[in-house]
Amino acid sequence: MSTNLLIISQLIKMATKKKNTEQVSDWNYSPSFESASHLNLKKKYDLFIDGKWVKPSSGVYFKTINPANEEILAEVAHGNQDDVDKAVKAARKAYTDVWSIMHPAERAKYIYRIARLMQERARELAVAETLDAGKTIRESRDIDVPLACNYFFYYAGWADKLEYAFPNRKVESLGVAGQIIPWNFPLLMAAWKIAPALATGNTVVLKPAETTPLTALILAEIIEESGLPAGVVNIVTGHGDTGAAIVNHPDVNKIAFTGSTNVGKIIQKALAGTAKKLTLELGGKSANIIFDDAPIDQAVEGIVNGIFFNQGHVCCAGSRLYVQESVADLVIQKLKSRMDSLYLGNPLDKNTDIGAINSKEQLETIHKYIKIGKQEGAEMYQPKCSIPAKGFYCAPTLFINVAQSSVIAQEEIFGPVLTIQTFRTVDEVIQKANNSPFGLAAGVWTDKGSRIFNLSSKLRAGVIWANTYNKFDPTSPFGGYKESGFGREGGLHGLNSYVKLS
Amino acid sequence: MKNKLVKKEIIHPDNIFSPSIDKVGVEERVARFQSRSIKNESKLQGLKIALNMIDLTTLEGKDTPGKVKQMCYKALHLHDVHPNLPTVAAVCVYPSMVRTAKNEVKGTGVKVASVSTAFPSGQAPLDVKIRDTQFALDEGADEIDMVISRGKFLSGEYNFVYDEIAKIKETCGKARLKVILETGELATLDNVRKASDIAIYAGADFIKTSTGKIQSAATMQVTYTMLMAIKDYYDKTGIMIGMKPAGGISTSKLALHNLVMVKEILGNAWLTNEWFRFGASSLANDILMQIMKMETGVYQSSDYFSID
């Protein structure tokens, strides 16, 4: 290359292109709120049992708030043991009398109908999800709600094809499924649980999380509207005791739980010795691995999406970042710069990238870990962004100079907090990534196809993404290794959790 | 055989070190820019910024002084019904039309850009390209839009492409040089990134997507890839490089999406016509129509907007 010309051209450029400071137009986005006018929330929600809205036997209601501004959205019934018992009885009766003996093609029609009705009320569901959970309207509109619909569509298709899903096996439904779901993807988790259970001929008692019951209750309205036989799906809202009542109810055949590892362990102990089938989808501390030959800018997007999607309230969040040392400085510089361009604020604004933390309690947990990170001597980075005075918010946070031995690299934080470690060789990063009690997901970023196959066979994680992160699809199974749980949801594998094969 | 002392010429390998680009990832990133909601104040402001970034262009075999004069008049009088509108940034013509254009826009601040280097194919020897450029400059061009030798690029002769750009830059002197990559012919985003890096390091003041003669032209994916090259260069050197997507941007919405992308990647400093341009011929009227809609509340028929 002609070196002289290079130098000349660089000199000319230096002379003519000093950093331009004048004539800067300050162009910022005006607020652009999704309208909430089409959402008619009730003041009070009862329990949905046996196709009817019934008052809780205790008469107790609890408030659900908007974490973005702490305003009360509605009051929701607190179901107790008696209510759960009613719901299980209704589910049993519906199972025996109607649902288990219905022709599978008929079952499919109901599930399709639910999916279609959800689509019709998609905007309403998206706004309700954003108000109740604090997640951005962009995510609830573009991801949560359409994906939830797709799970119903997908499993509707399986309902009359089970003999092809399990060739040469006799397929039977289990009975009544008790399902307990978390607050991070309230509607989507309800879909993950209800759709395969119905397709395989089971009936359901579902308990949404106490901080996010609204979309499950709107789903109950949809189910009511769909004409699904009474008792096939029952929604019982409440707190931990409500969940415990479902787990411990003697007439439940299957428990499906998504939530924290601690509660998962309690459930597994409670079910020991019973005939109840169990699937657990628990916590994670997933490794996102960036090799030096990765498409760096796209990898940076993947890091951002991996940890800041849904404010990091994602069980498979890529919360442990491993970057090959030769590109670490570059990746960190680019990551910081990208974080500076994220908009934090009201989740209902269509341009918000980072919404609200789901609850005060969770915000405190995140703050606790940020404090630990600082105490451990890790270098912290947060972009300068103004945090709204009301509501629960946490700036996207980065910790550099972290080791495997750091608490913040070991424990699940469930917030927008990323730890960064560097590595030198492939073997080293495989060892480090597997060196965790969890094993839910992992990400691998490289241009080498062979390396992707090598890592995906050696990483002990249920889901491994190559050159992408946090992608979900009804056809793909999801679930964990080790303390991240067992059983798979989604895809053909997801049917297995709801059938007895012989 | 005699042992001759051979003076070996040092041959530099045709290596360039550009990061690899994952197309799927780029598409996802671009979709995020497209989902930004630009309303009210920010929309009006954005539309006016975009209007002021346009290089109003005519590049046809049938161009005549008459046509060019009319286009120049339009450049200065976009829509006189509306009192507070900016002019476009420049008019862009063939070298033979530069003098005509220059006479029309003299003293107005609107620049004259001339394509050169055997536009649009670039299939000519270097001395012809230099003379082509020199002619445009002598006629009064403020800016030169050159094309790279895509044939050489695709056959891996990156040094040739680099040296050619550097020579044209030398010829340009103070005139700003826009380097057209013709991304539609480069086919992959990896190539777009490579060509961007070559152009920037060889002395381009601006990098530009397309001639407008080839489909596809200025897709958001391509512009994104080029903006990232500009960002990386700026982060390394502190030197700003301009960007000009050209071809295929004919709606306000697409123009605003481009501005969103520039803002979020490079920052507000790039949101002036000194650093960002749209090469377009029909974009201006769509923007004008949107501005009038925002200010009067109704869409006016296209017959109310002049078509020079």
Image (tube, coloured by chain):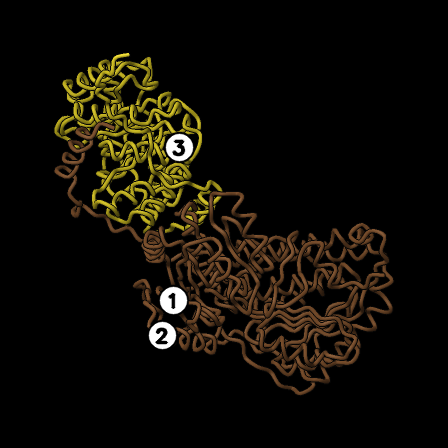
The picture's colour for chain B is yellow
Where is residue B104 shown, x and y percent of the image?
18, 23
The residue that label 1 is drawn on is A402
Left or right of residue A290: residue A338: left
Residue B284 location, quadrant? top left
Q: Amino acid at mark 3?
A: Asn
The residue sitting at 36% across, 43% down in the picture is: B256
In the picture, the quarter occupied by the N terminus of chain A is top left
In the picture, which chain is brown? A
Nearer mark to the viewer, of 3 and 1: 1
Where is residue B259 shown, x and y percent of the image?
33, 44
SS assignment at label 3: helix
Q: Residues within 10 Å of mark 3 (few under 14, many from 20)?
A: many
Q: Amino acid at mark 1?
A: Val
Residue B233 location, quadrant? top left
Is label 2 in contact with label 1 (beta carbons under 8 Å)? yes
The answer to whether dots 3 and 2 both sit on one chain is: no
Where is residue A441 shown, x and y percent of the image?
55, 59
Please tell me which residue lies in front, A89 or B51.
A89
Residue B191 tag number:
3
Residue A376 tag number:
2
Is label 3 in contact with label 1 (beta carbons under 8 Å)? no
Residue A194 location, quadrant? bottom right
- C-alpha distance separating marks 3 and 2: 44 Å
Residue B6 tag number:
none
The residue sitting at 64% across, 53% down in the picture is: A476
- Is any atom of residue A224 visible in this view? yes
Q: Earlier in the sequence, mark 2 or mark 1?
A: 2
SS assignment at label 2: loop
Q: Is residue B58 above or below residue A228?
A: above
Nearer mark to the viewer, of 3 and 2: 2
- Is any atom of residue A30 visible in this view? no
